[in-house]
């Protein structure tokens, strides 16, 4: 059973790092929206291409723009924090019980 426990623990760790990295990319997207950068910059295009598949469905389902301010990144950040606290911790605890 320790092999399954190690697998679950590794999965939880990789998922935690991936969610943390994506969280910082979302924060970068929000900061970039404040300064209005050049849309042809490769870094700006990368950040927009990486975050838009997640932000667009949230924006479409929940119109969360009030007074010209888009709160979609904040809701996505809350979802990422929830996934880190619930899913990653649950996987880690399950892995610890199997070890």
Image: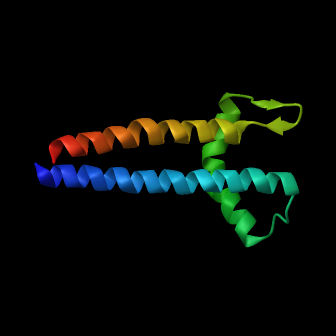
Q: Give x and y (percent) for residue 10.
A: 30, 56
Residue occupying the far left of the picture: 1
Q: Give x and y (percent) for residue 3.
A: 14, 55
Could you tell whether 34 is left or right of 99 in the image? right
16 lies above or below 63: below
51 lies above or below 70: below
Could you tell whether 30 is left or right of 7 in the image? right
Count all numbered tags in the image, as a single digit.
0
Residue drawn 66% across the image and 43% down it: 55
User: For residue 62, which quarter of the picture?
Assistant: top right
Residue drawn 62% across the image and 57% down it: 50
Could you tell whether 79 is left or right of 26 in the image? left
Residue drawn 55% across the image and 36% down it: 79
82 lies above or below 47: above
Q: Give x and y (percent) for residue 60.
A: 69, 33
Q: Nearer the viewer, residue 37 or 6?
A: 6
Residue occupying the far bottom of the picture: 42
Residue drawn 68% across the image and 38% down it: 74
What sort of colour scheme is used for the picture?
A: rainbow
User: For residue 89, which quarter of the picture?
Assistant: top left
Q: Give x and y (percent) for residue 47.
A: 68, 60
């Amino acid at each position: 059973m320790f092999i399954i426990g190690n697998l679950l623990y590794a999965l939880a760790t990789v998922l935690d790092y991936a969610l943390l990295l994506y969280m910082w990319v979302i924060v970068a997207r929000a900061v970039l929206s404040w300064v209005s950068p050049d849309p042809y910059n490769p870094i700006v295009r990368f950040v927009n291409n990486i975050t838009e598949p997640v932000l667009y469905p949230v924006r479409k389902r929940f119109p969360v723009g009030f007074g010209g301010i888009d709160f979609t990144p904040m809701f996505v950040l809350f979802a990422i924090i929830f996934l880190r606290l619930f899913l990653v911790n649950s996987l880690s605890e399950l892995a610890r019980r199997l070890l």
